[in-house]
Amino acid sequence: MELVKLDKGFKDELLEVWKIAFEEDEGFNDELCGHFFNHENLWECAYGWIDNNKLVSTYLTLDVDVLIRNKEFKGHYIDGLATLPSHQRRGLINEQMLKDAKYCFKNNIPLMLVDPSRDSFYRKFGFEFAIDKHRIVLDKNFCSREDYKPKYIVKADIIAENSELQQAYKDMNEWLFKNSSYNEMKWPECYEDIKFKRRDMTIAVAFGKSNKVCGYMLYSREGNNVRITSFRYRDLNAFYGLKEYMLSLDENIESFSFLSIPQDFPIDLMLKDLGRPEKKLYFGSWISRMIRIIDFKGFLEGVIEKAPKSPICIHIKDHIIAENEAFYTILPCGEVKKESSGKSDVTTTITDIVPLLTGLKSARELYYYGKLKVSENESVEQFQPVAEVIKQIDEILPKVTTYSADEYLAP
């Protein structure tokens, strides 16, 4: 078998592998897929395994920029992992990920990212839960309607048919990437452009003074339910403007599904009469992204929010990327010193420390989970005092609101 770079000539074979591997047929034959798979940029990041002149496995590796703790990082996002049943469990994907990791290490790309459809599989390679998102489903009559005096103009249209609103969407996302505290991500061209081919998606944009873009809502209709893919805003006038637009859509609308919101979304500004038993409210959360740290030292230096008062030494174990296995001392000046040996204050693995560095979990939580070990033989009781070094780590790497805010709208 041979690992090769794919080009557009492999399109039909790739689609066949995906149909079989994902047990999907009609979804890969529509007009949207035609646009996606004909995009030249897609084939710059497509790889596959060939066996006897037949494509048996696919792998997309995308160059992205991602925000973590308000810092911008380069990353490789992995997508399109598919292998024919006859060639599964042969280590093909694992071998490709290892090649990708080596490439990232040589090119100072500190992270690999993936959406966790098979988290147990990815965890074997060192990925761990890193970022989450939430969703809410609520009855329309659960929503409050203020005496709102419109301050912003809201324009709406099918996103595929309105170039003005497409540009507004781009402008808003550019502003968010520079200013947001969430985990915004810049996709490659093929993933961005396909959003503007969606004829099943409507965009509503809130414009402020001087026609400044201040927020948008992406949504689709499913019976009497409105499915809101994204609800983004830069100020409360935009929030209330989009809310008023949402509630004025159609008198037959019965419910709204917010499919992607951060934990701190101001749902209180949406609701009234919480105690009414006939009203329905569903709130859920899930992990939306996993991360594999490729360059631990570089990533650690990038996410530290403030220097410790005294040095903290962390021993990292990594059974795949040997260069990461070392003792890392965070110095009071904010720099990180890497050594092959030393005396550690905390021991952990390259996998277990991921949610601490992204802000998904606190050091205290990971300490009680047994993921951050102050002593190798320590049995942590759930109500015993937290070790002092754990408190110090929480000061320099505090827990934050994580949220993979980007819209994945590819087929």
Image (tube, rainbow, N blue to C red):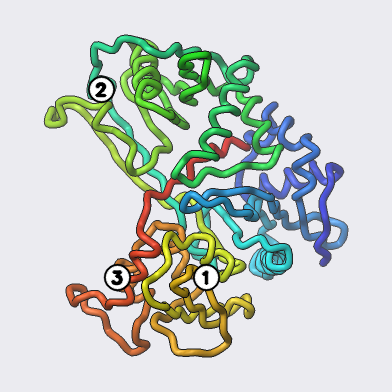
Q: Residues within 10 Å of mark 2 (few under 14, many from 20)?
A: many
In the rendered view, would you say 44 is above or below 407?
Answer: below
Of label 1 and label 3, which has the lower sequence position?
1
Q: In the visual, does 93 lie left or right of 358?
A: right
**Residue 210 - label:** none
Q: Where is residue 389 in the image (x, y as percent from the top left)?
A: 33, 76
Mark 3 lies on a secondary structure that is: helix
In the rendered view, would you say 145 is above or below 87?
Answer: above
In the rendered view, would you say 215 is above or below 355?
Answer: above
Q: Position of residue 132 (x, y in %)?
A: 42, 50
Name the amino acid type tagged 2: Cys
**Residue 335 - label:** 1
Q: In the visual, does 296 lie left or right of 188?
A: left
Q: Where is residue 336 in the image (x, y as percent from the top left)?
A: 53, 73
Of label 3 and label 2, which has the lower sequence position?
2
Of label 2 and label 1, which has the lower sequence position?
2
Residue ID for mark 2: 143
Which residue occupies the foreground of this view, 240 or 204? 240
Distance of mark 1 from mark 3, alpha carbons?
A: 19 Å
Name the amino acid type tagged 3: Lys
Distance of mark 3 from mark 2, alpha carbons?
A: 41 Å
Please tell me in which quadrant of the rendered image residue 40 appears: top right
Q: In the visual, does 199 lie left or right of 278?
A: right
Q: How crowded is mark 3: few (under 14 residues within 10 Å), some or many (20 or more)?
A: some
**Residue 391 - label:** 3
> Mark 3 and mark 1 in contact (Cβ < 8 Å)?
no
Mark 2 lies on a secondary structure that is: loop
